[in-house]
Amino acid sequence: MSASLAVEGLSVDFSTGSGTVQAVRDASFSVSPGSIVGIVGESGSGKSVTCRAILGLLPPRAQISGRVVYAGRNLIGMLSAEVQKVRGREISMIFQNPSSHLDPLMRIGDHIAEPLRYHLGLSAQEARKEALALLDEVRIRDADDRFSAYPHQLSGGMKQRVLIASALACQPKLLLADEPTTALDVTVQADILQLLKKLNRDRGLTMILVSHDLGVVSEICDHVVVMRSGRIVEQGSINDVITRPQNSYTRTLIESQPSRLRTLANGRRQGEHLIQIKNLEVHFSEGRGFASMFGRSRRTIKAVDDVSLEIHAGECFGIVGESGSGKSTVARAIVRLVASTSGEIRYAGQEVSALAGRELAAYRRQVQMVFQSPFDSLNPRMTVRQAIAEPIWRHGLRSREGAQTRAQELMEMVELSPDLADRKPRQLSGGQCQRVAIARALALSPRVLIADEVTSALDVTIQAQVLRLLARLRRTQDLTIVYISHDLAVVKAFCDRVAVFRNGKLIESGTTAKVLVAPAQAYTQALIAAAPRVVETSKGAVAS
């Protein structure tokens, strides 16, 4: 039988060089046996800290008060040895980024077998047998082969399944899942949510699901707790909170869901074909290095396979598909970050592959790209002002002093506070960093802005702000935008036309209203069906 959990007046403070940070303030909620409770809120709301406090995973500098009562025992203040007996054995946790929580030097099977041997005292052979059964339960095919694989040999979705299997190894009664589907493709996300629902149903497993996405929480949760700035601002049944939210912040979260966004597309198609792609192919060879030295054959991966499409001046053109579909490779081929194997890419009638020298530099000023992770694409040593100003003076458009002035104007354009000008990327939030990347891309006054998954890892409210910003810039700067995403709800709200990619091929394309409302292809239909969204049912439940 699952045990209940009660969090009573929990507060968590962190001592820092600049003072005390109140991460969680007087949080109280309960979890009934066999139920699934969702905790939602933006980054910094305290939801992950709350889960880590339950399991005693906070650093020594954390100051904790209040009670966490599990099966009649207060976990706060419990001796370390006693907590270790509970952790993993009775309460387990799935973390957000599996790549950061799987040992790259440890085989997949050993990640699952280790807790079995530590907590249950199983022999190596017994632990292996149980680990194989768990891999099968979380729907990893070819469990025998995967047992000996390393994390880098698995996809993001498969690594998340391994973390789930490891967390389930000792048959815990309570599972804490911290953003288990963030940044996963919608179909993989749907698979993980279905798996969690099945485990709850078949095992009677009690769960706490942490997310910034109310659509994900609505899929499987019975009860929801809404957090903001370390405090619980609202809680109740999932249907009551979504249909009758009492707090203004909850209403903002709901209205910021991609499926609830008012359309930002203008529905107009301009006459000029600005970018024309014809029979484009981009191939990569797998098995470089030692394989080629010893004469082994190298497998050719067709990242883009015979793709043809046209992008009109002034429109927002969406490209959607799962990871590995080729959508980002097409974008990189347009800006010549990867070489085309064959086919044509024309910009304003010019063949892009033929450009060189000054013509290529001029082209790159006209077509700019914003990447998915601004933390990776911005120089960590540069301030915001320097990062935005650099392309301006490097291309000789203004002096260094003039570029600094222009950087201030661009910061205002993308709604960045002047106070942030001298900060570095690590001192900014994800949304602020993405605005810096957009300002830097706009610094050269381009005609085309390619946005590659620019909102995929952002909180829904920040995502909505960035989308509105891009829509305004498109209107005021006369931009053509190529928007790449795996989130169909965002593309539906933002784009005029859309192309659907799968395995390097163009599956279907057309107006967003046609493709995403009445799709012709089964694959597009499956993508749409897999997307979570906040919907009330007539029976008072919430479904997708």
Image (cartoon, rainbow, N blue to C red):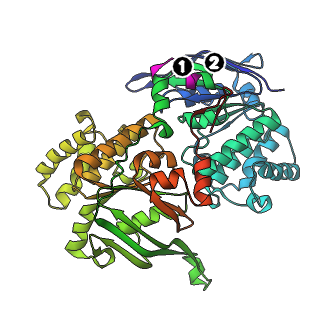
Instruction: Say whether residue 349 is left or right of residue 302.
Output: left
Residue behind mark 1: 232
Residue drawn at x 45%, y 53% is: 512
Residue drawn at x 45%, y 76% is: 279
Q: Quadrant of the N terminus?
A: top right
Q: Quadrant of the C terminus?
A: top right
Pinpoint residue 33: horizontal percent, then vertical percent: 77, 24
Asked if 427 appears above or below 492 in the picture, the reply is: above
SS at badge 1:
strand
Instruction: Say whether residue 17 is left or right of residue 480.
Output: right
Q: Which mark is residue 251?
A: none
Pinpoint residue 529: horizontal percent, then vertical percent: 61, 48
Residue behind mark 2: 29
First in residue order: circle 2 vs circle 1: 2
Asked if 523 appears above or below 428 in the picture, the reply is: below
- Please indicate, yes or no, whether residue 383 appears anywhere in the rendered image: no
- Residue kind at label 2, given as amino acid type: Phe
Q: Is residue 397 magenta?
A: no
- Residue kind at label 1, given as amino acid type: Ile
Evaluate if marks 2 and 1 touch, with contact meaning CB atoms under 8 Å apart: yes
Highlighted range, magenta: 241-248
